[in-house]
Image (cartoon, coloured by chain):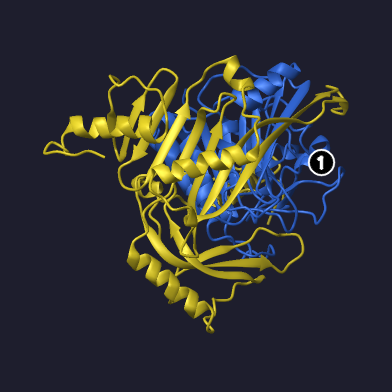
Amino acid sequence: MTDGPDEFTDRAEAEWHHRLAVEIFGLRIDPGLPVEAERNVLSITAPDICFAQRLDCRTYFIQTLDRGEERRTAAYSGPDEEQFAFARSLFRRLGISDSEIAGEHVLREYGRAAEIDPESRRIVSLESVSELGNSVHVTRQVEGVPVWSSHLRVSLDAERRIDYLELHWPFVPETVLREARRLAFMVGNGWRPPSVSAAEIESVEAGIVHSPPIGYFFDIHAAVRVIYRPTEAGFSRRPTYHLDRHGEPVRLRRTDELIHEPPQPSRSEAGGTPPGRPAGRRGHLAMLLFGAALMALLYALARAAGLAVP
Amino acid sequence: MAVRFSTGSVSNYVAGGCGGPDLPDSVPQGGAFRSWYLLSTAGNSVVSRWDNGDVWGSDFREAGGGDLDPVGGADAVDLYYFSGHGICQASPAANDPDFLATCGNFGKPDTVDIGVECRFGGGRGQLRFLFLDASCPMDLVSLGRNWFPVFQGLHVATGHSGTVTADCLDTRTRGDQLGAHTAGSVPGFRFAQLSIREAWMRVGIIDVQSGCSAVVIAAGATRAQAEDRRDRERVQENWPRPGNQWLAWRWVTRG
């Protein structure tokens, strides 16, 4: 969005960020506010709103800062179609084709409250359910290939201004798209995922997976997503694997790689056993030593008292 | 304000003879959640970070004092994050229990009936925030049985409501992004610090099946206080201990 010989200066970058906020997202932000760069993020923070973008992928954030009581009660209440149209207009301004929209839903937040008897913890009164807010959730495909990690979540307020937005829609390299198509072909022609204990295959689909919106790394891969259905009664959480063409897990770097946590012993080695719980290994050793010492003391006392002991 | 927190994450179920299947992303998810709390400039500190067999069912039980275990009890810290199995019903009813399922090397049994066995924040209990990433630990239809008794000083809890066919998938992303949104100021993403409700309503529907709901519940002395905590309380804000005469909850369902 910036032309001219100075397009890589700090000033040009700040102007670009401001223009995105105003021209693409329709925000009213004082043009004099500074643009801050920290880690992989550019942001402008106004008294009532923050606009930010990641520098390593096409990801934008708008976060309304606390407007107090007014904000909490002023959720958008218009027709769903108007919200979908708003989302699509954003995509157009960003140069994203409608063909990349895999699905769009309005997610409604509901709330309820109950008064509880403090002694019995039984319900004294149960209030009716209220709709408290809503947002549009858009999922993505590229040329028919699902991009599971991409999304738009946008919520409007009663005045049809953006209350919050998270648009995580990274560019997909041609090589990744090609590999995803190759994986789709393989899935359709006998590629078999690995078996998993206590579960059976529920679904197998080729697509694209990438890093989440908040993070310091950006990775993107073609993958086969295999969802396994538990076979044992009771458990139902699905193990979900993203695999490459060889059946190996694809890797997305995570923030925990920035943290050094020392290895820790097993909990039984670490001790700290609470009352009523079997002692850990260290606890068992201490109890054995204590028992042995007690026996030796009793033995010595008995001998000293002249009792006949073996 | 810094918080003292613990994580308990269980990936290995089969080898421990606890049924299954294993959840390979559960332990990494706990690590991702923890990493944001450690990267935050809020000064949070880890009390325990047990995985697999070192996460015990007794860590969540009031009886026997296991929940106060200083090196793993859920009620011995300000915030506890759990990822692992729960148990869903095919069609949950008002009197059905909610569960957490561990696969511990001690502290048996592994299955914790939340409504019967968990009481957080009362007496010497310190727990203010409980984040559960498991199957159906917070079914909307049975909150009265399972969650109203739990709040003995606990401020806010999060979980999912669902069925055996509307459950959450094993993922690293949900816990990762929940941590990012609630840890306190994190470099680059300071603007993204949200109330617990805002964070969970956004990330709780990541990688879940259609029909699964992200649920947040909070307590207060009055309806207004309970709703205010449900909607606005943040981990880093030092809100006082709540009354528990009222409970307010909020949910969003994946379409």
* Circle count: 1
Q: Position of residue A206 (x, y in %)?
A: 50, 69
The local secondary structure at tag 1 comes to helix
The residue under the point 60% across, 51% down is A284
Horizontal relation, residue B122 to residue A239: left or right: right
Horizontal relation, residue A42 to residue B59: left or right: left
Horizontal relation, residue A55 to residue B212: left or right: left
Placement of A154 over or under B86, stated as above or below: above
Camera sees residue A274 = no
Chain identity of mark 1: B
**Nearer to me, A176 or B103:** A176
- The amino acid pointed to by label 1 is Ser
Which residue ends up furthest to the left in the rendered image? A5
The residue under the point 46% across, 47% down is B32
Q: Position of residue A119 (x, y in %)?
A: 86, 23
Q: Disc 1 marks which residue? A: B142
Question: Dot 1: few (<14), some (14–19), or many (≥20) neighbours within 10 Å?
Answer: some
Which color is chain A depicted in? Answer: yellow
Q: Position of residue B82 (x, y in %)?
A: 60, 45
The residue under the point 40% across, 23% down is A28
Which of the 4 image quarters holds residue B94? top right
Camera sees residue A310 = yes
The residue under the point 27% across, 23% down is A34
Which color is chain B depicted in? Answer: blue
Which residue ends up furthest to the bottom in the rendered image? A190
Which of the 4 image quarters holds residue B113? top right
**Nearer to me, A134 or A244:** A134
Q: Position of residue A310 (x, y in %)?
A: 68, 57
